[in-house]
């Protein structure tokens, strides 16, 4: 039984709280949040303690920490967990700044503290099966990868301004997916983007529509397409193409119903957003975090994976600005 | 090169004319029709002779006859072809009356004249593949068959009155399909039907919605569902289920386009009607008729197949009227 | 907060236990089972009391009872709950004998005790949406219904012998679905069946492959097809056809992955069996049972629904034996 | 009735010959080919004249010319047709060299001779519907375009060497499609490619796997992915994404059959290659060429479209070589 301290009682924190409580091998013992009311409310719901941020890591009965607080606090919390010798599962990203991300990751390494990052899509059953099929040779030698990732609607411009930009905030998931599925590091990134969805996003210095092309040292290629808005739900699809065929993961729907009429055959739009599409993934990644603490080999992203994804996002941002592809060593 | 006399210059006749002309191994030499203007027009289009019904079979350069005239003339024409020693490809049915159908079929047999019936669905590429998969053992031992067949819209009540009823006019295609795919004769027929689409069809003594259950001597079962009206096109589907799995044929569409939007994913309705869905089948059945005349083993329905299908349709009609299943010996 | 006594600690009982515990508005206070070890084990897992069958209904803190014991005990338990004034959610069926089923249902009515039956498929999200679409007029006037229901593999012949036969044991779910979706009582049942999957099932006096045709007073028709074995998973599909179109529910799969290769495009088989396909349904029906106790209008099957479904199963069994359709008043 | 001279009796020439003959408004009067035997054979099949290349354009009864000879002869034939005042339908490309392509196109313009190019995919029913849906506003403002185009198997390396490279030989179709669907000229091209399918293709200085990213002046983006080999048939798909949704065209199959078994549900691979996938397109583009000669507004690619597509292919080739995006004015 792994006893958790949960840092952050917001939307994602609440999902993790429920999964910690309902899992068979974990317990939620304490919750903390900068907003002590939110912490108290969540603690009450799951019958655990609400604790102050300052003293959160002093709790003797905490085996592991789940960080789901705001992005700008991740690195600090990771360093505090490292100091306290507590293994960490942290929501992505480590930090928006690569220096800071590297720094906190190194502190965890130096302290010998396990650090995993919540790239939850690796635990989506469809994408996980994609990975297994690639590994099993179903498509033969993998040659190209095609990732489509569109949010249903853009966040408030206020959020956009603090987000680090589309590449670091949104595409970073796809960049991790690309590294994970390719099984290799991209050596070149070319990015293009526009503000087609909302001119205010452009005015804020960001893009809402983007494409990236990645290349590995052995010449394999990957396309990523992002949009901040999609009328037919949360569009999360991947195709992996190789010498022997292709394996692809399509969107998920809430029912298998088809309506046939004069207009043709209509099936449901994609599930609305990440809470629905990745509900299983949130649960399964937590199981594997617990498994990892018990020595199981897992597909969880490590701190280093988080740093690598951020490097790619930074490169994409530079490519967008300069107009040239960026080479990575 | 097989030289054809075409009997009937109506809608179906014109399809056959084009296929005869465009096929690589056939020629259209003469057309006849009770309406001599229609015959003349079609003859002009394909640069062949329009001939009078009376003298049609006296043409020396005719190798085979294609009968696409009105149903009530089929049996007479078959007998005349038998007398003239000309092989026949006749649109279904032989006749609406089983006695008359049997009689003309026997005359063709006695004369040693090949007689094939236009159960075109056997040549639909999807249904033909179903048959091949069943034969190849893809589903293991076939256990149940499920046939859905719906027209886009009911014909005029005037047509209904002369049609012989839904079972003889419409379901007869499905009954042939059942026999062909089951590879066995049903020994029991149970039928139910209602006039749900149009009360006038009920007033004319017919049904527009029907279900039939067939049973073979070895206990295999078949469901057939018919409707005279379907909002999403010509609904022509079959499922064949067995010990090792299921093989099914879905509707055909004119493009592979999907429109995704708030409503979900919309693909095209089924092709509108038999001219579109069975365009390939009309062409392929003619090729096989020519092949049969040259000694090839074919899947074409024979006169006997036509008689058997009519027996089943008659049994369904009796079951509908009596309310009891009808046993066939 | 509704406090539950759970009767039965077997496979289905354990599912309900978990849903009671995890639901937001219910608690599991006691478990009983003829096998006291099984009760103790389940009670331990969810930190509640294991109680003896004799004293189970004497618990003061029980607000409602969930009956998931073996079929032959349902009626007795219902009567005891009625005597104790406890509302009941009972797994289907009330009893295999229509007299006994009616009797216990009447006792619950007389006692003013709510009695609901676990026809869980009504709560499958896809079938529930089918019902809503029909109600919303999406298909216009409903004309025909087509239900396919196949288990992945037959149960042991020993089970078959005690099961009441395919119609009462397996098709009863489809018969409830037919009544529920048609929104009317069938007035005629015609059934056919064979032992094609396993001759031992035939030797035991039952069938493993069956078709039923139902007719309502206003002439609407319904087909049901059952098999005890299906190679591609738990085959649970429904089509509802009407004047304006068709709404259909297809099987569910565990991922949205497609593998493309020389063989074509391969997607996953259907989910393996009811535990997977109806996991959501078990959870949602329980929520609605709690809602019903709080006055909410629900789609839960009542004791009367259970009795009606059993009447149809009995009629199907008689039709199979007699070879004739059975008329219901 | 448009009377055609066909130049080229090879594989594509034979397709056009059949479509000319079978169309309702055209006739094939003469065929020429550098290989006079091939010309004679095709002429015999369709009962028309075989003529010598030298005298081909001197035929008085020729209303239009269809050029389906080898690529390196296109420009010469176009200039000869221009001189003879004959409207031309020419297989793509005009020429592999942009200077030569521009030159012959200008001569046709100067002579007032209609010049259309066989970018047949514009006439594929699925892609044509995509274009119509975009035009009708189905996806709202078009934002991104995603084109996948994979051949079933690479051509001989000998062909590759003379082909002008993947971008000019194969992707040129996709570049035309991009221009046509975007309704605007790309202003930037970035290309990457590798020889992953066959190292001999790399040794010949070409790539067999490629991705291109295009950008329009208003910031819209397009991805193209090509491979010279695809195990599941001729992979020809497009997605057009915009503010209101997405319209996509999937591959075509020869039947609608699904095989369900332990492995899941398997549908057919894509049609094998362009002869099958674009059979309708070849027929429909010819109809529109005839329509264009009669004043109809058509979607046929013009000589100028051919030149523009070649400019893009050249830019892609330069980008591949230089590693930098290429800007087009």
Image: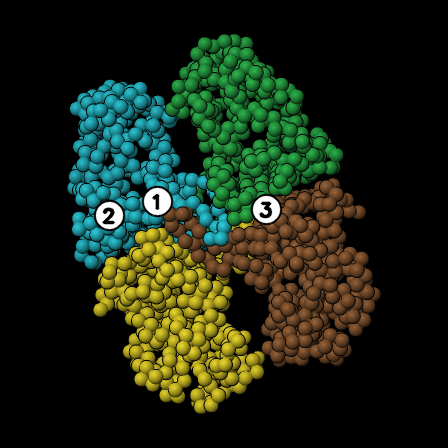
Chain colours: A green, B yellow, C cyan, D brown
Labels 2 and 1 touching (C-beta < 8 A): no
In this rendering, is residue A4 above or below C298? above
In what quadrant of the picture does the N terminus of chain C appear? Answer: top left
User: Which residue is found at the position 39% from the left and 44% from the top?
Assistant: C270
Q: Which residue is mark 3?
A: D246
In this rendering, is residue B215 above or below A257? below
Q: Is residue A322 left or right of residue A247?
A: right
Q: CA distance from mark 3 to mark 2?
A: 46 Å
Q: Which residue is mark 1?
A: C234
As drawn, the residue found furthest toward the right would be D110
Residue B209 visible at all: no
Q: Chain of mark 1?
A: C
Q: Which residue is mark 2?
A: C167
The local secondary structure at tag 3 comes to strand
Q: CA distance from mark 1 to mark 3?
A: 33 Å
Tell me which label, 2 or 1, sits earlier in the chain. 2
In the image, B45 versus B203, the foreground residue is: B45
Residue D51 visible at all: yes
In the image, B248 versus A152, the foreground residue is: B248
Name the disc covering residue D114, or none.
Answer: none
Residue D133, percent from left and from top? 61, 52
């Amino acid at each position: 039984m792994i006893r958790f301290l949960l840092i952050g009682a917001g939307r994602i924190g609440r999902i993790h709280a429920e999964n910690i409580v309902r899992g068979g091998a974990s317990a939620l013992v304490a919750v903390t949040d900068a907003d002590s009311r939110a912490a108290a409310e969540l603690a009450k719901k799951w019958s655990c303690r609400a604790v102050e941020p300052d003293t959160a890591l002093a709790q003797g009965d905490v085996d592991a920490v789940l960080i789901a607080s705001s992005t700008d606090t991740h690195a600090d919390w990771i360093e505090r967990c490292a100091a306290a010798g507590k293994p960490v599962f942290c929501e992505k990203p480590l930090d928006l700044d690569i220096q800071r991300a590297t720094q906190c990751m190194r502190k965890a390494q130096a302290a010998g503290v396990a650090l995993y990052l919540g790239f939850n899509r690796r635990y989506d059953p469809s994408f996980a099966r994609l990975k297994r099929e690639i590994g099993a040779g179903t498509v033969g030698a993998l040659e190209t990868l095609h990732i489509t990732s569109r949010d249903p609607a853009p966040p408030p411009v206020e959020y956009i301004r603090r987000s680090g930009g589309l590449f670091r905030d949104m595409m970073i998931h796809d960049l991790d997916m690309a590294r994970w599925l390719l099984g290799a590091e991209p050596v070149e990134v070319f990015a293009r983007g526009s503000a087609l969805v909302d001119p205010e996003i452009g005015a804020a210095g960001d893009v809402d529509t983007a494409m990236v092309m990645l290349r590995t040292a052995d010449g394999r290629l990957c396309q990523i397409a992002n949009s901040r808005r999609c009328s037919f739900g949360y569009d999360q699809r991947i195709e992996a193409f190789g010498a022997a065929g292709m394996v692809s993961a399509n969107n998920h729907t809430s029912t298998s119903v088809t309506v046939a009429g004069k207009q043709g055959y209509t099936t449901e739009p994609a599930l609305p957003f990440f809470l629905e599409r990745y509900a299983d993934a949130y649960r399964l990644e937590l199981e594997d975090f617990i498994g990892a603490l018990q020595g199981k080999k897992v597909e969880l992203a490590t701190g280093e994976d988080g740093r690598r994804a951020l490097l790619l996002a930074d490169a994409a941002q530079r490519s967008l600005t300069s107009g040239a592809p960026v080479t990575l060593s």
